[in-house]
Each structure stands twice: as C-alpha cells, then as structure tokens.
Amino acid sequence: MNSTLPQPHVAILGGGPCGLYAARVLSRAGVRVTVLDKGDRPGGLATSHKRGENWYDMGCHMLHEFDKEIYEDMMSIMGADSIPVQLDAKIRWAGSFYRYPLQFQDMIKGIPPFTLVYYTIGLFTAQMRNALAPWIPKNAEEALVMLYGQPLYEFFFKEFTHRYWGIHPRELSATFITTKMPRLSAVDVLKRALGKIGIKDRAVHAVDSALRDETLHYSRTGAEAMPRHISRVVNAEGGEVIQGADVTRIVRDEASQRVTAVRYLQDGEDHELKCDECISTIPVPHLAMRSEPAPPESVMEAAHRIRYKPIAIYGLLVKKAKCIEGLYIYYRDRAFHRVGEPKNAGLVVNPPDHTVLIVETTCEVGDEKWKGTEEVKQRIFSDLEIENICHKEEVVEVNLLHCETGYPVFALGFEPHLEKVRDWIKTIPNLQSVGRQGGFTYPNMHSAMRMGAKAAQVVLDRLKPNHKTQP
C-alpha cells in the first residue's frame, strides 16, 4: 500500500450503474473512494438529460426486482422517488402488436398454413440435427440457423440483424447469439419433447428470455434519479463523485505494474488522483490505450480491434397527451428500432398535455443519424406517422443525444482480441475492468450493479489486512 495516503484510496473510472454501485459498497464500508465520470450527470447510458423543461432518457433503463439485495438497497436510497410500473413492452410484427419478449406463437400469426408448416419443419429439423449430430457454428448466421432452422432464419432474423448492427449475421460472432439474442419459446417446447424420447440437447444456447410479466422501477424525472441518488449517498458517506472528468492516463508503477494514479481532464485543466486500487468501467480499448506505460504492441493492436456500436437518441417533445400504448415498442423495418414513451411509466412532462418520445437508432459516428440531418428527421417523422404514433406537426422539439460506445459489437473473430486485452489486465494486481463497457457485455441495470458490488468486494478482500470493513 502507498503509505503516504491517510487511508487506502480507490479510484473508479466511469459513473454508470456498475461504477456507482461499486462506490456505494465501498463507501458504505468506510473505504475512501472517488468516481471519475466524464458526463455532466452520473449514470452513463442509464441516465437522462434535461433539455428545456423536460428530461430525456438515453434509452429505456429501469430497475428490475430480480436481485433482492440490490433492489431493497435501492428502494431504501430512493424512497418516494421510485415509481413501480408494470412491464408493458411490445413488438410490431406482421401488421400487429405483440407482447415482448416475442413468443413463437406470436411470430407465426398471419403466416399462411403451408408456409407455417415449412417453417415448423425447418425448426424441428434443426433441433433434431443439433441433438443427434451437434456442430459448432462459425458465426451468428450459422448459430441462428442451428437454433431456428434455415427457413425461420431467412424469414425473421437475417434482415433485421443486418439492419440493426450494420453487419451481416455471417460477420458477427456466434457468441452474440449466446449472450444477446433471446430464444423463442417454441425451441424450448421442442427440446423438452425431444428430451422425453432420449434425444438430448447439445446445441448452442441463446440467452433466456426476459419475463413477460414483472414490476420495474422508474422515477418522475426519468432514469436520472437512480444514479443521482446513488451519487448522493456515496458523497454523504465520505466518497466523491466528480463529473466532467475525462480520464486521460492510468499511471502504473513499472516495477510492480500496480496502478498508482489516474490523470483526468476537467474544465480544460489536468488533474491527478493517486490511488491504491482501481475499478474501471470505461470501454476496454480506452483502458489499454490510456495506460502509462503502454501495454505491449500486441495488446494495443488487439484493443484497436474491439468495437462498439454508436447510438443516436432522438428525444421528441410532442404536443399530444399520449402516443403509444405501453412503455416501449420495438420495430423491425423503420428508421428507428425502438420507441419509448416514459410518461407512461410516470415521467412528469411539461406542458402536461404534451408527452416525450425516446426514439432510438443505431448509427456510426459522423453519419446522418449521428448528425441528425433534416433528411433523417424527416424519415423518422414519416415512420412515426405511418405507425400512427404522432404527426410531424405535433413535434415541438427534437433533442439529439449521442453515445459513441453504445453497444459492444461481437464481430466475427473478436474473442481472441478481447481475451488478449483481458489477459494483460490480469497482470495488473490492483486493476479490475467490469460493467457493460469495461466487461464488454450486455448486463441489465441490476446485473451491472451486481458486477460493481462484486468488484468492490474484491477490493475489500485485498484491503482487509490494512482496513477494517463493516460486517
């Protein structure tokens, strides 16, 4: 430990749900902790931004109740600011609206009987093949065909996946399917039936679908309330959350390789924060590229190959009391992939006879969606009208929000590059890289917070000989 410090000091890079909750656990245990977050508000992607009199979320972010310990802790922190809301998500499919996650029986509605038989045979054949002669898919296209059969892949998944990511499924890793794509209920039905006759499932697995019925938690000021309250209690317990702090260097001792300080830029001025432990939630490539001394050349090359998909959020103030039924709706063939109406979850909107729409798109930095060109806005307005959500004349404001590292991209062959960077991180005794960006994964809110809690516990275990923790 650095004996010049009055007590062990933990630096946390990034103030999203993971970093903030790590700070919550550490500060509650009496550990000196500082969070460096480059945003003007805590929360990272899981926050809101105020434009005029209203709040606009960076997507749809609400707390689930699955992790009882975190849920109860957050309720004690938020108090009356937490609003329980029933999950009501939909997907626009085959000319109708269906509950999301989409069930197989919903997906096949409207399909002509003979075509449906063709798709079902394809699904059954794929499951039989996987059970009797399992094979390892080379990419996401093969993984989807393995799960659902060639006909359903062509019909449902191929075009949408390509449009959403800007990458053909054959250029995405099969890992994408096992970590991001919810599986259809019919697959489970078939697998159970095959299992009863002794045909075991040895195929690739998609992730479990979310529950169709559950309670979420939101706030009258949007997603910003939860990270704001965590930041408040961290500060109250002796920690510090610094906003507008852009990390520029992670300084390591050349002999021990330990992180000794973090340099950051705030309001045009350089600062240095000395530390004994470091938890990073910033994007994995940034962690490697901003390390001093620099990692080996092979690690730097690997870091440059790790990609994220940028997002552009169009926050619309609409002169209409209500636009959609439910919390949010997914679309497969529009200029946007999801539209949320947070007022339906309790967001206060001004004027009261107006509403706010969160229109989500994926993009590339510098393209038309990123810039918010008039052409893109007109396409969005046109698709909103086609979907009978609102008319162009009813849109009072358009507020554009960005994130360069919105979604980790599981491009074909990304795994060895990520593993190389992770192996390098493991050589640094007092550094952890976790969370959505730092872990290069897709956790929901409570899962990201649990990752932060686990990282904090690792730090507490390391500090135990020199620091008395609370029971």
Image (cartoon, rainbow, N blue to C red):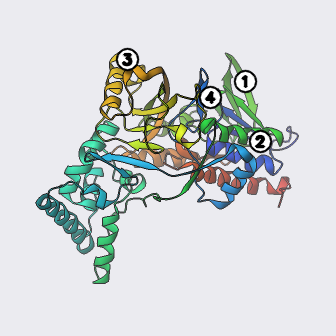
Say what amino acid the circle numbered 1 marks.
His
**How far is mark 4 from mark 3, CA to CA?**
24 Å
Camera-side residue: 10 or 288? 10
Say what amino acid the circle numbered 4 marks.
Gly
Say what amino acid the circle numbered 3 marks.
Thr
Q: In this view, does 230 lie to the left or right of 249?
A: right
Mark earlier in primary sequence (4, 3): 4
| Element carrying mark 4 | loop
**How far is mark 3 from mark 2, CA to CA?**
40 Å
**How far is mark 1 from mark 2, CA to CA?**
21 Å
Q: Which disc number belongs to residue 373?
A: 3
Mark earlier in primary sequence (4, 2): 4
Q: Are marks 3 and 1 in contact (CB under 8 Å)?
A: no
Q: Are marks 4 and 3 in contact (CB under 8 Å)?
A: no
Q: Mark 1 points at which residue?
A: 271
Q: Where is residue 111 in the image (x, y as percent from the top left)?
A: 18, 55
Camera-side residue: 24 or 94? 94
Q: How crowded is mark 4: few (under 14 residues within 10 Å), some or many (20 or more)?
A: some
